[in-house]
Image (tube, grey):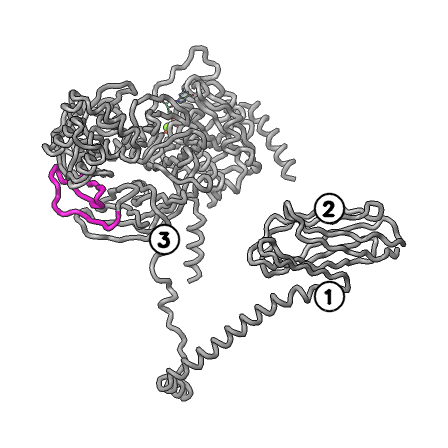
Amino acid sequence: METKTAEKSGNERQQLWLDAWFDPVVNLHAFSGGICLAQDKLLVGDLSGALKVFHNGKVQASIRLNAVPSAVCSYAETAASGDGPGPTLVAVACGPSVKIFRNLKPYFKFTVPAAKISQAETDIWNKLSSGSIEVGRACAMLREQSNVSQRSLDLLALETDPDRQQRFLAEELDAAALAEPLPSCITCMGVLPKRDRKDESEGSPCEGTLVLGTESRKILFLDAQSRQVVKTVTLESVPVYIAISGSKDVEYRVVVACRDSRIYSIRNGDLVRNCIEMESPICGGLVRIGRDIIFACVDKTLHSYHVKGRKNWSLSLPEGITNLTAFRCARRGAEGCLVALRSGEVRLYVDKTLMGSIAPPKAGVSVTGMVFGQFSREQDALVSLYTSGAVSVKMLKRTAVLDASKAPEPGPPPEQDIPLAVPKKTKLYVEQTQREREQAVEMHRSFQHGLCKLRYLTASSYLRLFQTAGVANAQLYTSSHHHVGRADDRKPRLNMSVAVLGLGPQFRVTFDIENLAAIPLRGASASLSFDREHFHVDAPFLELPALIPQASQSFHIDLHALVPGTESPPLQLCIVKEPATLLVAEVQMPIVEV
Amino acid sequence: MSRIFRRLSSSLRSLSMRLGKSEACNVVVVGLDNSGKSTMINHLQQAKAEDDEPYIPEEVAPTVGFRVETFRRKNVSFTAYDMSGQGRYRNLWAQHYTEIHAIVFVIDATDRMRLCVARDELEMVLDDPSVRSRPVPILFLCNKKDCADAMGPAECVAKMELEKIRERPWSIISTNARNGDGIEEAIEWLADSISFDSSSASIESKHK
Ligand SMILES: Nc1nc2c(ncn2[C@@H]2O[C@H](COP(=O)(O)OP(=O)(O)OP(=O)(O)O)[C@@H](O)[C@H]2O)c(=O)[nH]1
Ligand SMILES: [Mg+2]
């Protein structure tokens, strides 16, 4: 038992990550799909519409994209001759096209082929252009359609912004534009490796082909040159997250999380019939670890399912999950996931054991995107972007212990197995249980009666305390006692008792104020006016805190008598709340003896 | 007492040098992969300080495991354990700590991103029981100084928190392992800082 707690605390103390780079003002904004680690470079498809390339903590290039990127991937070009991988390509999905860069120079652009528009949808647009229906009506009709084109989606998306919607319509209702269908946007992108990876090639990018998910509910497999679509799989909903495993030459599986809270999987190009269906939408990401799929739902849960659909486990987390990324540490044989929570904390789970967590750089920021992988010769690096625009790169410590079996095990605590020391049944015990059984109703009633009495007593004592508190205070000193109560309900009503403490030349005027109104009084202040010849006061003005109704609060002002042996004119203590004076009390000072 | 002894031994040493005898010492060369350890040792082996014709380094492959190389400087014959800096081999470093007279830690001054890893590894080196128990000198090489974005030694000292090392002599020298800039100076410091007296490490390791 003792060794266990020691081990546990040791594990909590264990530092898992090293800070490689942190820049709070780099102003990067991207989601996980838009972050890509390519050898020693960090590529970020920034939401400002630029591809930013970082090397060694510095911006190496910033390429304007003219559109907001949705995903960034890097892979090796399939070499024509077939010997070794070709140069590294970077693919950036923006809007309906994928821009491919070679050595960071624009190389090729692939645009998703536009889908055919259904007759019903064409009719609606024709009516709209001829002016026979209103925009609102058209939107309502479009919404009823099961699957609409990108143009209609854009129109519907602008419904909350009528001005922009009108502008959009003005452009789109041009007859020439209408004839040409808009291609649909890319929502997610992945790379399907050409062949299974061998260990020694780790780090260098693999040859592969692009797989795209589109707003038109399709998964598109491109050819090696990214010139055309070789396979299209149509889903029932719009794909949002994609995870690819295996390789094209051997066997592969593409797992896709869609907006309908379902996870579909495509095996070697064919849609698998059964899917995983969740009750709440999937958020944050989708991770393939070995034979398992890990994902998060908006109801703060983390789930693991076998690819075939069998559930492994679920975890309920204390906060919403903003991001999820795979954690694969081959050197230590540990696999799991990194989970970013709404508070900005990033947790590392190996299997379902919490191994450690990373605090956010400051309170109030959370992760917008994060990626774990090989970066700059280091196998296990974590890059995370925060809502504040900060970037952080952390590296897993070489000596980090990631053994799930050594971690404090979840489940019931060991105390549960220790039997309780239940005393033997005595005669008294038996009699008591007998009585409880037979006279349960009476016992309950008398208990309730006692409880009721106790509550009454407590409440009345409490009330009495309030009523007598002010008086009690006032009677402690034999000094002037002022009581001013005003009937006017709009004005605050106060009760104040003033006492002078001390023999001189130092005096203290203490006063207890009680707010008689039902509402708290804020912004009041006390000021003492006095004869400057006789007294010196450091702080004759006192700002009062909020005066709570029906409670007495005590304050004091210190004064110093200057002329001993004489009688001084009375002091005036005013309680003021701009613009009115609420209360004035005259205080007669005793003669200073010394 | 020990000070007198040390002074005695150092005078003995200069005597033995004058007599033409040489001392032998073992150093372990550590640092992250790609920092230039093997390049540095190759330079020491092949370029003689007195040589006029420049030595042109050939590209070295990443070291696997470790290799043992010897070279002579200032009448000291060095045996260097050129360790591999790759993550999976770094646990081999500790195997040599018992039998060494000095540690050389090579830092790649261009690799800012992994400086945190280098620092972590250094902490582990200094924390090793057999290093902690003996005040062997440690020499830092701030390598690749020829590269444009290389860190200077001051920056390395600050970021690696080298000022914290108090229990042993240490120094940091900017080097270029490819053309040998700074390396002779570094080895000179090493030869001067190694104490050849009682701490005869090999004896200690034999007793163990
Ligand atoms: N520009 C420059 N390159 C250097 C310098 N020193 C080494 N290099 C280069 O850095 C690379 C790595 O050098 P190595 O000597 O193999 O590094 P290492 O520390 O032995 O690496 P491991 O054996 O893997 O631990 C080589 O390409 C060297 O040419 C230097 O001072 N300047
Ligand atoms: Mg080497």
Q: Is mark 1 within 8 Å of ligand 1?
A: no
In the rendered structure, the residue with mark 2 lies on which chain?
A
Q: Would residue A425 be seen by someone viewing this image from the given angle?
A: no
Q: Secondary structure at mark 2?
A: loop
B191 shown above or below A563? above
Q: Is residue A542 magenta?
A: no
Give the residue type at disc 1. Leu
Residue at which label 1 appears:
A476
Residue in view at x 26 percent, y 53 percent: A313
A591 shown above or below A418? above
Mark sitting earlier along the chain (3/1):
3
Q: Is residue A257 magenta?
A: yes
Q: Secondary structure at mark 1?
A: helix
In the rendered structure, the residue with mark 1 lies on which chain?
A
**Image coords of residue B146 (percent x, y):** 44, 18
Q: Nearer the viewer, residue B170 or A362?
A: A362
Q: Would residue A567 be seen by someone viewing this image from the given angle?
A: yes
The label shown at residue A539 is 2
